[in-house]
Every structure is written in C-alpha cells, then in structure tokens.
Amino acid sequence: MARVETSSSRPYHIVIFGASGFTGQFVVEEVARTASEGPNGTLKWAIAGRSQQKLEKVLEQAAGVLSKPELRTEVDVIVADVGEPDSLAAMCKQAVIVLNCVGPYRFFGEPVVKACVENGAHHIDISGEPQFLEGMQLNYGSQAAEKGVFVIGSCGFDSIPADMGVIYTREQFKGMLTAVESFLTISSGPEGGCIHDGTWQSAIYGLADSQKLRSLRRKFNHKPLPTVGSKLKRRGALFFSNEIQQYAVPFIGSDPSVVKRTQRFLTEEHQATPVQYGAYAGVGGVGNIIKLMFAGMLFWFLVKFSFGRKLLIKHPEFFSFGIFSKAGPSRKQMEASSFQFSFHGEGYTEDKDPSQGKPNARIRTVVQGPECGYVATPIAMVQAALTILNEPAALPKKGGVYTPGAAFARSTLINRLNKHGIQFSVI
Ligand SMILES: NC(=O)c1ccc[n+]([C@@H]2O[C@H](COP(=O)([O-])OP(=O)(O)OC[C@H]3O[C@@H](n4cnc5c(N)ncnc54)[C@H](OP(=O)(O)O)[C@@H]3O)[C@@H](O)[C@H]2O)c1
C-alpha cells in the first residue's frame, strides 16, 4: 500500500471535528488562542461537524469570547457526518491533523479513524474509553504504520497528565524507577463544578460493555510485562491516603490502561525498565464517601440493563449527585476549578540491584493545571497536535496507533504543557 503524504501542502494543518460539541467549542477557542501565538497566519485551521449552522454559531461565540471578530470570516467550515463516509474522506484529505471531539467514541470514533488512516491525516482524540482506544490499536495499527499516519488517542485530561506524568517522574529520578502511584485531587470554587453529559454517556456505555474489553485484550496475545524490583501493592477499594490526606479510591478512568500500554511500548521498543503503576483519586471526607458508595452501587446496578442505562442517560444530575450535568459547567465554575496529580515513585539507586531487596530511593512529582474537562483537555489536545506538526523527528520512527506517552516520550510536549498552564514539577 502506498504511503500517503501528510504535509502542510494540505489546506489546513488542523481540522477540529465535532467543533459544535460542548468540548469542541473550547478546543476551537484554544486553537484560536494558540494560532495567535505564532506569526500571523502560520497555523491554518478549520472547523468541522454535521451542522453548518451550529458551526457558524461556534465561530460567532469564539469571536466574542476572544475578541477576535476575524474568526467569523477567516475560519473555514467543513460539513462532515460520521454516517457519511464520503464526507469524512473529503474532510480528512484537507487536513494534516484531525482533532476529533465527536464522542462517545465507541459509537462514532471508528469511521473517523478509518477515514484518517485511508486519507493520510493524523488523528488525535480525547477519548477516555479503553475499549475504543485499544480496539483502534488492534484494528488500525498496521495500516496506520504502512501509511505513515499517527493515530494518538486519549490526548485530553484522560490521559496526558497521568501518562506524561509517569514519564516525567522517570526522567527526574536518579537511578531506576520501578513503580509509581498517582493520586488525583480536583478542586472547585464556591460555585462548584461538574462534567458535561458527553463524558457521562461514554462512561455508561463503557462500563456496560466491560466484558468486551477483556476479550479484546486477549486478541493482542501480550505476554505480561516483567516486574522489576518489588511488586507494587494494590490498595483497597477505599482507604485513607496519607499522601493526599483524604480518603481515596482506585481511579476507574483510562489512565491505568493508557500508562500500561505506554510502558509496554517503551519496554519493547526502547528496552526501558517497565514502571508499575497504580492510579487513585481522592474523594474527600466521610460525607462524600457515603454519596459515592450510594451513587456507585446504583450506577453499577442500572448500567447492566437497557432501561437502567436509559434512566442514567436521562437524569445525569440526579444519579451522579450533580457531578455530571446536561448543561456542563459554567465558565465561572471552570475558572475556579483545578486539578492536581501527585506522583509517588520508588526505585533503586544506580549502585543497588533491583532483584536484591526493597527500593531504596523515592521521588515525588506533581502535575497540576486548570479545570480538567474543558480547559486542560483542549490545552493538552492542541499541544499534542503542535508537537506532531513541529517535531516529526521526535515521534516514533513509523506511524501507527499510539498512546500519548509512546508518541511523545522523546518530544518537548512536557515543556509545551508547562508553558500553557499544565505544570510538571518535582517536590
Ligand atoms: N479526555 C477527557 O478528559 C475528555 C474531556 C472532555 C470530553 N471528553 C470526551 O469527548 C467526547 C465529547 O464530549 P462532549 O461533552 O463534548 O459531547 P457533546 O457535547 O455531546 O458533543 C458531541 C459532538 O459530536 C457531534 N456528533 C454527534 N454525532 C455526530 C455525527 N453523526 N457526525 C458528526 N458529528 C457528530 C455533535 O454534533 P452536533 O453538535 O451537531 O450534535 C457534537 O459536536 C466524549 O466522548 C467525552 O467523553 C474527554
């Protein structure tokens, strides 16, 4: 199969697909903001979606928010629908990179990945759905490699902070890092905060289908990664974390799956030492635990049945105690929200043999940033795209379907994120 040239001779460096979605609109604003950092007109971009009218409204709004009236006239609009392959092909032929914000990805993602691979456009998504992410690796990994196309999944809050955080922790560690635990805490201001319904739906269908993920993983036929040094102990379903001084639970998002895939890639392709990883999220005090347990049990029960899923989808606020909502967070809520990932790593100094005894060195790093879903996610997604555009030599030698860590381990993505408000530091 001939390799398709993905070069800036295409009319747009970036096309934002799903620009009319809740997240898409903030990705549009972030691209507009970032484009103005470079010399005028350097970054050529367009927005895409299934409704011309809605897309024009998005430009109108972004023009107002950013005080850039020129957005209304200077940014092109492409109409494309996931259900119409020709429209997707036409969109992909015009783009060096498609930023795909159309989710749930399990329903809408694959045709876009296919169109990108067939038409030579790189694909970046913000999926937090392991089944979609790993399924794309299985189904399109070799074709993307043949075509020289990079399909890089989970480039939002899921899972750039966790995946790049583990890589950063290893880079900063003096010796051989063998295990990392991360603890996520989210803070919101006096008006609270919430996550838009789009992510709620992705979570509902993801959990309902978790059986399929297990059978998908068997198809990779992977050997378990070797455990170097002491085995990392798994914590319980609920525990008091001394690290973040609050109760914590295992993090059920895509981070563990993404970090594990990255570690496999780095071990197999670059002979790196695999880092064991455990991901946890703080839940606060006893009041929150009671709410969480109640909501969690109801969720696990309802998600198994079609009527239950319909109920969950119809009433996100009620069943999630206000964590998810159909309206999504307000701009004011977003401004007052932030996240912090605390990484606790352990390993062996150079003079110590990891097969002999317990780790003798520790490190603590932090990744922190603004509101996770609609401020940090667009920043991470856009910086991932700029890394592809500006640092092709730092990417893996051939195209393929990659995690952020696998694609960007040798790039300056962390520096780029530091400059744009997602900060990595050693404590
Ligand atoms: N990684 C992270 O941390 C993170 C953060 C935020 C969001 N996300 C993920 O991003 C995805 C989107 O979330 P959201 O809250 O923005 O959802 P949303 O508001 O429902 O947006 C969905 C978008 O998909 C478009 N769409 C739906 N069907 C389509 C079709 N057939 N053809 C073309 N476009 C179609 C919608 O277009 P219309 O406007 O025309 O309906 C809309 O633009 C979800 O999967 C969510 O989990 C991830």
Image: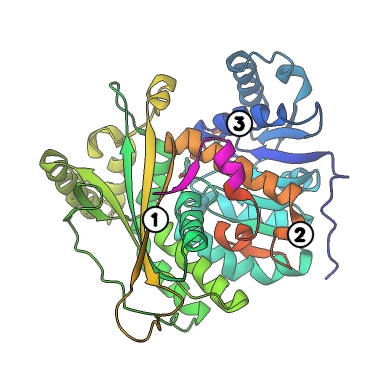
The type of residue carrying mark 2 is Ala
Q: CA distance from mark 2 to mark 1?
A: 35 Å
Q: CA distance from mark 2 to mark 3?
A: 25 Å
Disc 2 under 8 Å from ligand 1? The reply is no
Q: Which residues are magenta?
A: 415-427
Q: Which residue is mark 3?
A: 30
The residue at the point 22 percent across, 35 percent down is: 321
The residue at the point 40 percent across, 62 percent down is: 256
The type of residue carrying mark 3 is Glu
Secondary structure category for the residue under label 1: helix
- The nearer-to-camera label among 2 and 3 is 2
Secondary structure category for the residue under label 2: helix
Q: Which residue is mark 1?
A: 206
Q: Is residue 222 above or below residue 103?
A: below
The residue at the point 61 percent across, 27 percent down is: 29
Nearest to N terminus: mark 2 or mark 3: 3
The part of the image, by quadrant, that contains residue 409 is bottom right
Q: Is residue 217 left or right of residue 110?
A: left
Circle on res. 271: none
Q: Identify which residue, 180 or 359, lies in the foreground.
A: 359
Q: Which residue is mark 2?
A: 393
Residue 120 x %, y %: 78, 56
Residue 224 x %, y %: 43, 82
The part of the image, by quadrant, that contains residue 20 is top right
Secondary structure category for the residue under label 3: helix
10 Å neighbourhood of mark 3: few (<14), some, or many (≥20)?
many
